[in-house]
Image: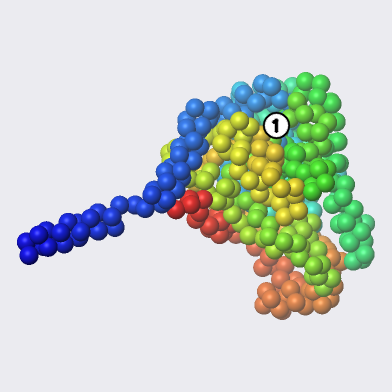
Amino acid sequence: MALAKTLISIFAAAMVTALAAPEPAAEATQKADEEQLARHVTALQKKGKAPLDYVLTILDERDLVLFDDALHNAVEPWEFYTELVRSPAFRRKARYIFLEVIPSNRQGALDAYFGTFPEDRTLLYPAFQDRYGWSYKTYFDFLHTVYEVNRGLPPEERLKVRAVSTPSYWKEMERLEDWTNYNTREVIGRDYAMYRTILADLGDFNGEKGVFLTNTRHAYTDIRQQDGAPFWNTGTFFRQWHAEMTWSIRLNAPILNIEMEKAADGAAPRTGEGLERYSYSWARVAQGLWDSAFKTYGATPVAIDLTKTPFGEAAYMGNHMHKAAPGQTMADAYDGVVFLTPFEDQHSSASVGFIYTPAFKKELARRYRITHTPAQIETMLKDAGAESLEAYIETATAERPEAPSPQAADAGPMDAWRKR
């Protein structure tokens, strides 16, 4: 009887020990996860640099740095750009700042603003009154900083801000057909036009240097189609024809996760961005592994190359991902990545109302009636609860405060990459 009780006790103890211990497979998976994370953190510790120092180092070797802010309305990239222009070391290296969002035929508005004292913000309005207005406060704050910096410099050392987007032709548009024709052709030629404009301003790389402030659609460098041909954009033109002169940097933020291309809806208005043509969501690169490494590193701003580091091994995400050749990585799209702040601390810009003058609001009503059919406008007003197009415009152009980034909130958990 005593022997039986002893055997039962031994068996019970063994069962408790077995249940408490991790299963060998689960333990191996957890170990692999930690090793993967450690590789990334170690890379940041050994090869990472403060973002400003990283950009200055790149500008020692390259003449043009392209920045992908991921989201045009993001606040943190523009805070970093402001840090750059305030840096005497940056200004000694690069004098040109190229802005993607401003039409090239609005360069006169920028020149008038920077050439007038005292500062007159109203001179900028035409530059930001393309399409339905570009009202992100971050842009005005940034240009104000450039204005202040330039006022303290001799003319030959001042920063030069250049508008490089395709020209705006709203005065020539009178019908929906005009808009459709312009929007179709503008998309086709815009990236090449920006490439040629930047190249000309830099004198075909004769020693001048600059930065191109843009987003994903124009900053990736070598993403390939199924047949091996590149998806051409501004960054790709530079990479294919001036490979040693440029460097493309992704600012870590929510990334576009394209699931599929939708059938064209002839009843829906077409935008320049084209997102209405896709089923998509916002996500984290490498299912959050980049963000986990940044957090473990201490969430201190840091920049690192993608080539020859674990970060560059992440599967490519972004424009064309649903139809790109398989096996491509983030290192095929960008040369480096800058981590500024965790997703939970990222923000969307405030919107200003001052560019929406009475005359521009009247012009907006005309533009809506050109770019939308009567049925589309009726649906738009119904969805917004607006009694008239003019009432809709009053609401749409109102000032809005800075807010937490909704894309960051929708990007999913940071630890989705873990296999356990």
Residue nearest the observer in this picture, 307 or 162: 307
Residue nearest the observer in this picture, 15 or 248: 15
Quarter of the picture containing the N terminus is bottom left
Residue nearest the observer in this picture, 167 or 280: 280
Residue 4 image point, x, y percent: 12, 63
- Among the 4 quarters of the image, the one containing residue 327: top right
Disc 1 residue type (three-letter): Trp
Q: Is residue 418 visible?
A: yes
The relative height of residue 90 versus residue 39 in the rendered view (above or below) is above
- Among the 4 quarters of the image, the one containing residue 53: top right
Residue 247 image point, x, y percent: 70, 31
- Among the 4 quarters of the image, the one containing residue 131: bottom right
Q: Secondary structure at mark 1?
A: strand
Q: Residue at x 6, y 61 (%)?
A: 2
Q: Residue at x 73, y 75 (%)?
A: 381
Residue nearest the observer in this picture, 193 or 384: 193
The relative height of residue 192 versus residue 379 in the rendered view (above or below) is above
Q: Which residue is mark 1?
A: 247
Crowd around label 1: few <14 · some 14–19 · many ≥20 (10 Å)? many
Q: Is residue 108 visible?
A: no
The relative height of residue 281 versus residue 253 in the rendered view (above or below) is below
Q: Residue at x 63, y 60 (%)?
A: 281
Residue 74 image point, x, y percent: 61, 49
- Number of numbered callouts drawn: 1
Residue 82 image point, x, y percent: 60, 37
Outermost residue toward the left? 2
